[in-house]
Amino acid sequence: MQNFVFHNPTKIIFGKDTIPLIGSESAAFGTKALLVYGQDSIKKNGIYDQVVQSLQEAGMEIVEHPGVQSNPVLSHVQQGIDLAKEHQVEVIVAVGGGSVLDSSKAISAGALVEHNVWKFFIGKKSIKETLPLTCVLTLAASGSEMNSGMVVTNEETQQKFGFANKHLFPQASILDPTATFSVPPDYTAYGAVDAIVHVLEYYFTTEEPSVPVQDRFMEGLVINCMDSCDRVLQNLEDYNGRADLMWAATLALNGLTGAGLGKAGFPNHLIEHSLSALYNVAHGAGLSVVLPGWMQYQAAKDPAKFTQFAERVFGFTEGSDIQKANDSILCLKAWFDKVKSPTSLAAINVPESDIPQIAENAIGLAKIWRMQEYTAEKIEDILKLCV
Amino acid sequence: MQNFVFHNPTKIIFGKDTIPLIGSESAAFGTKALLVYGQDSIKKNGIYDQVVQSLQEAGMEIVEHPGVQSNPVLSHVQQGIDLAKEHQVEVIVAVGGGSVLDSSKAISAGALVEHNVWKFFIGKKSIKETLPLTCVLTLAASGSEMNSGMVVTNEETQQKFGFANKHLFPQASILDPTATFSVPPDYTAYGAVDAIVHVLEYYFTTEEPSVPVQDRFMEGLVINCMDSCDRVLQNLEDYNGRADLMWAATLALNGLTGAGLGKAGFPNHLIEHSLSALYNVAHGAGLSVVLPGWMQYQAAKDPAKFTQFAERVFGFTEGSDIQKANDSILCLKAWFDKVKSPTSLAAINVPESDIPQIAENAIGLAKIWRMQEYTAEKIEDILKLCV
């Protein structure tokens, strides 16, 4: 096991009827809030009204910043920063999924500096402080509600970049599974895919090939993401299914899975970020396109961990190691198909002839993430397995 | 899944050569430390010198409070409180295992009040604040290094009582697996038993019978506690074995296993605390006496979860549910025997005729813990299965 520091100070408030706690949790940090959210969905399902009422009852003044899109963009973040500065807000309240959270994190960092917030993303500046952030989560997917990462797309440069910093942990996140009842089947599945890939990026890519405690934890999470997603797709208002998926997705990327495993690569996210940046593909949909191809590429080079995965997650006990590994990739791909998350570039209308352009886009982030082994040639080879 | 709050602010610093960080981690809270430790073992293995050097280099003044015994006693805690008050220490530095940590937690709470610290244990007073606590862990067992619980024995009243309070989380805990290399085989095994029972108390007793995410997590921890303990007993200086055991024991009781499961009973701890209080049995040794009997008692009443345990932890696929459950209890007992942790009252020299007296002692804590269903009669029935 490698040395590690695990320090996750986010307070998770999980369960039914917990949204009215957002007022008291936020008021602990000040009286003026920037309320960040996406489109109209939280107005339709009543979450907006609950949040506003709770904040007002806690005596808070609210400045609104709606309109976050999935694959959130820098220009909208910048508008939020301007609002936060203009109104001197003391706390950011994010109501939404990963896009809203990540926008809010970027605003919380950008509001306290004079320079352009993008400098944090390209490594030219380092975050020293942020405004406190609270959240009501409405999508089980990104894990951003309990981690220190954020991802934003710069539309001008067509770069979807992300990084982590200890100041980016939310102070408190409210996870009410009923808030995800209205998430449609496709985005429910994309969320489960996102969480699964978060786990597998660590499972298959870390410096330390295996830490037994972490391996069992991650295998359990993958099984539970699939199982709970299946239950939810049978009945979108299955409370325990929604709860299991929400909690599994949070645990999938809160720092615990990778403890002791050393440096991890995020090759599937690396490549998917270019799909999102260039074609505005939903993140989970892009990941289910990339992952099976990447696994095939990787398993051929290093089948041992894939064999363990096949045995423990899919219960394969027969056949050679490489056969078990391949069968497990087919199983995962079949599950993506079953939940209708795309599994080929063709399915997201990306022509094979674009592969060099996607690879060219991806190596920009590979440099920032210091994944030197991911050359344009290697990325092209992987993408050819995703056709 | 039931509603829950998960908020664990302890910073874990894990790995080789991390002990010299205790100075900077502690100095963040003040310049005067109460250094709490047990017997001479940390002087023999060099940990004492490393800690003192690190604290001094960080500019700290040290007040020493050695002599914590396993099953730590209130009188010694009281001496520590007196020292802390007399010298106006600003931070408590615990160097040891669960007993040292729990004593330190009690001192950290008692140092800031005028009344007797035992009032916290019997529910007459509630903790409002504590001195900050840092720790260097030397035993994989209690989980106290990353949780908000503490257990202390009142020698006068022969009560071993424990409880949790959010102010009792350590600020930072340093977990260097090499610090456990000198733990002898018996205490290594007792530590693994303790961690396993921490997991199983939640696994088998909570209001919510099952949360799939938590179940897989807990099953993985039990498998890993046994497996890593086996490796360590083959070679006491197996770094990865020590690391896996240390990390699994920490995760076994840091609040994560029980998230969403509702109220848990701690029946094995309840009964074992009386064995420790009356006979000064090592905690893990007492638990391996009680657990198989308790499981037998419980499985007969509610075999479903025991069947899942048998299938997933021990791989039993054949036979009836009740047979699988019974076989898994036999397997666990056989593993306790293999690692030489006692599995009967006779093995710890407690005569069967003492059972009523033990039960009488245990119902005192049952009242405090609000486990009304554990009557003297029920406890006697369970203890008869432990003869």
Image: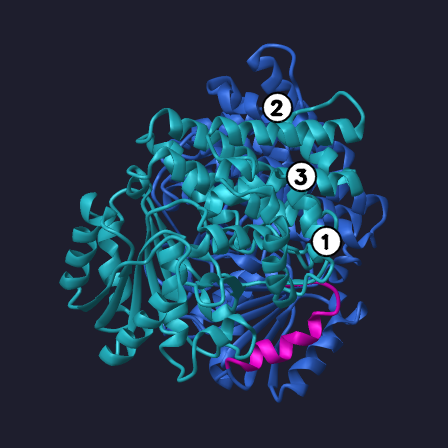
Chain colours: A blue, B cyan
Quadrant occupied by the N terminus of chain A: top left
Q: Is residue A350 visible?
A: no
Residue A160, image x, y percentages: 50, 51
- Residue located at (73% from left, 49% from top): A188
Could you tell me the amino acid type at mark 2?
Ala
Q: Magenta region: which residues?
A: A13-29
Image quarter in which the C terminus of chain A is found: top right
Q: Which residue is mark 1?
A: B377
Q: Tell which residue pokes out farthest to the top in this image.
A: A320
Q: Amino acid at mark 1?
A: Glu
Q: Which residue is mark 2?
A: A310
Q: Chain letter of disc 1?
A: B
Same chain for the residues under marks 2 and 1 in the image: no
Question: Compared with residue A247, is residue A275 higher up or lower down, i.e. above or below?
Answer: above
Membership of A14 in magenta stretch: yes
Query: Residue at label 3?
Result: B385
Q: Which SS class for mark 3?
A: loop
